[in-house]
Image (spheres, helix red, strand yellow):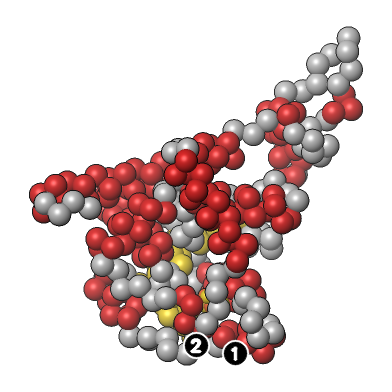
């Protein structure tokens, strides 16, 4: 941000408005929040989840629908974890909150060999606890702080290492059908969130207190995207748009499109949209 205080204030206001607009748009586009919703906001203590809580609280004050926000954080008992930081911050926010204490750190350390990344198991254990807790407090939505760049990185991780074309959806029903997960910041850029967090001086709690490093494959993808963005500004946004603009007939998934029905001189195969919709209907039944 600029060193001139007036210019810097204007830049911050613009950034704030942009983030609010993007969150509001994602909420509307994916029907994330309805009147009376009770939303459990997962706070990791990182920049993204602080920003999510702050922007949702902001929207709550002006939204045409009324909804509740409950902040939930997990103290996973990593060595050096500062237990006073989040309660001190949340007390000032005038919001219902819960800190769940669960020693997943010891579990992860006892299962994963030394030197291997522990984030996969750690996140699964955290997710399990949070989903269960959401049910116990009657939360109708679980809000996660993933942003546009997380979504695009996941797309490439799945493509490069999993052989599947999938990312992180803005809205998702959990496997057991008990929880609806929403990602209100699906349209927000990570760089914007980092700037916002810095300006807001959120009291960040580092995730790597446990000594683990973020997944090396994810780091490599992140670097690839940053390099692309430098060379071709706007590329990440274009890739993100592509996730919402899929043509099943131009891919090769036989479950998504009825390729068998394509025969010259015969009635046309159903359109991409019709095929995709019939599949969704079948799944819903
Ligand atoms: S860095 Fe440590 S605490 Fe954070 S997700 Fe990975 S294993 Fe868990």
- Identify the residue under disc 2: 77
Asked if the residues shown at circle 2 and circle 1 are in contact, with their CB atoms under 8 angstroms apart, the answer is yes
Q: Is residue 106 left or right of residue 187?
A: right
Q: Position of residue 241 (x, y in %)?
A: 53, 37
Q: Is mark 1 within 8 Å of ligand 1?
A: no
- Residue at 62 percent of width and 49 percent of height: 155
- Residue at 38 percent of width and 65 percent of height: 47
Location of the C terminus by quadrant is top right
- Residue at 53 percent of width and 56 percent of height: 222
Q: Position of residue 274 (x, y in %)?
A: 71, 27
Residue 148's mark? none
Q: Secondary structure at mark 1?
A: helix
Q: Nearer the viewer, residue 25 or 8?
A: 8
Relative vertical location of residue 99 with respect to residue 248 in this rendering, above or below? below
Q: Position of residue 264 (x, y in %)?
A: 88, 13
Q: Is residue 61 left or right of residue 139?
A: left
Q: Is residue 147 visible?
A: yes
- Identify the residue under disc 1: 106
Q: Position of residue 70 (x, y in %)?
A: 40, 68
> How packed is label 1: few (under 14 Cα within 10 Å), some, or many (20 or more)?
few
Q: Is residue 197 left or right of residue 175?
A: left
Examine the image and state in which quarter residue 39 appears: bottom left
Examine the image and state in which quarter residue 52 appears: bottom left
Relative vertical location of residue 68 with respect to residue 166 in this rendering, above or below? below
Q: Is mark 2 within 8 Å of ligand 1?
A: no
Q: Residue furthest top?
A: 265
């Amino acid at each position: 941000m600029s060193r001139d205080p007036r210019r810097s204030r204007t830049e911050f206001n613009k950034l704030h408005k942009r983030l609010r607009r993007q969150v509001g748009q994602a909420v509307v586009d994916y029907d994330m929040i309805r009147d009376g919703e009770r939303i459990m906001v997962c706070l990791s203590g990182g920049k993204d989840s602080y920003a999510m809580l702050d922007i949702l609280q902001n929207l709550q004050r002006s939204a045409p629908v009324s909804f509740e926000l409950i902040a939930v954080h997990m103290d996973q008992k990593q060595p050096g974890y500062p237990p006073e930081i989040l309660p001190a911050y949340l007390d000032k926010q005038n919001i219902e909150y819960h800190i769940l204490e669960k020693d997943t750190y010891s579990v992860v350390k006892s299962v994963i060999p030394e030197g291997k990344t522990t984030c996969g198991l750690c996140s699964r254990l955290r997710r399990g606890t949070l989903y269960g807790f959401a049910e116990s407090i009657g939360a109708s939505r679980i809000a996660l702080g993933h942003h546009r760049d997380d979504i695009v990185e996941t797309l490439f991780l799945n493509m490069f290492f999993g052989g599947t074309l999938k990312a992180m959806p803005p809205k998702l029903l959990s496997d057991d059908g008990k929880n609806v997960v929403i990602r209100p910041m699906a349209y927000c850029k990570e760089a914007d969130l980092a700037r916002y967090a810095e300006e807001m001086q959120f009291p960040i709690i580092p995730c790597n207190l446990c000594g683990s490093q973020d997944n090396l494959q994810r780091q490599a993808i992140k670097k690839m995207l940053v390099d692309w963005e430098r060379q071709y500004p706007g590329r990440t946004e274009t890739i993100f748009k592509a996730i919402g603009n899929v043509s099943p007939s131009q891919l090769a998934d036989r479950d998504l499109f009825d390729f068998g029905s394509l025969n010259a001189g015969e009635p046309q195969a159903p359109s991409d949209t019709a095929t995709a919709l019939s599949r969704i209907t079948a799944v819903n039944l």
